[in-house]
Amino acid sequence: MKAATLKTIKDELGMLGAVELQQMLLRLARFKVENKELLTYLLFESSDEAQYVQEVMQEMDVLFGELNTGSGYIIKKQLRKIIRLMLKHIRYSGETETEVRLRLHFCKNMYAKGLHQSRSTQIRNMFESQRTYAGNTIQKIHEDLQYEYVRELGRL
């Protein structure tokens, strides 16, 4: 089965009634956890973006607190898990300021743990790539906010 284009889907959804649309969304939510998480974000959390970002940051802090610094392999694995979580929430939000805040928070946690100076080049590269992504994303937001975030990035 070939998937239809977004335009075709959009046109078809425009013709449906509210009840049919609700049934389709509920059916879609049943199949994947990510679909259900995205619907939860859109329905309940998108109205208060600041609170949403705080919750994601707290979740990241918990994962950084559980970071096992015994082995480089385990650190890399756990950092990748945190990055996946962060990227998922960035995708849900779709706002550039949220992306900047989450990426900077990730970099701050790595800096606080001393992982930015790790012996492992892969771990250092994770830090540098997130720092670079944050810097590139900062350029996309409003100038008034850019100054504050550039200063924060400079401290790292």
Image (cartoon, grey):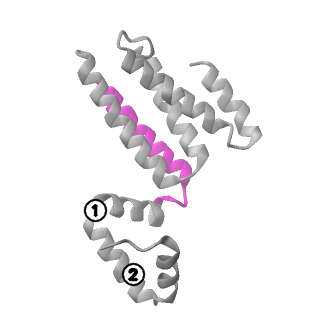
Tell me, yes or no, whether the highlighted magenta stretch contains residue 49.
yes
- Residue 135 coordinates in the image, percent (x, y): 61, 31
Secondary structure mainly formed by the magenta segment: helix
Q: Residue at x 35, y 80 (%)?
A: 24
Q: Residue at x 29, y 22 (%)?
A: 75
- Say left or right for 110 vs 30: right
Task: Answer whether residue 66 is visible to the viewer in this image.
Answer: no
Q: Is residue 63 above or below residue 97?
A: above
Q: Does dot 1 land on a helix, a strand or a loop?
A: loop
User: Which region of the structure is painted magenta?
Assistant: 45-67
- Say left or right for 47 vs 43: right
**Image quadrant where one finds the N terminus:** bottom left
Q: List the residue tagged with mark 1.
A: 32
- Residue 48 coordinates in the image, percent (x, y): 54, 56
**Image quadrant where one finds the C terminus:** top right
Q: Nearer the viewer, mark 1 or mark 2?
A: 1
Q: Is residue 130 above or below residue 122?
A: below
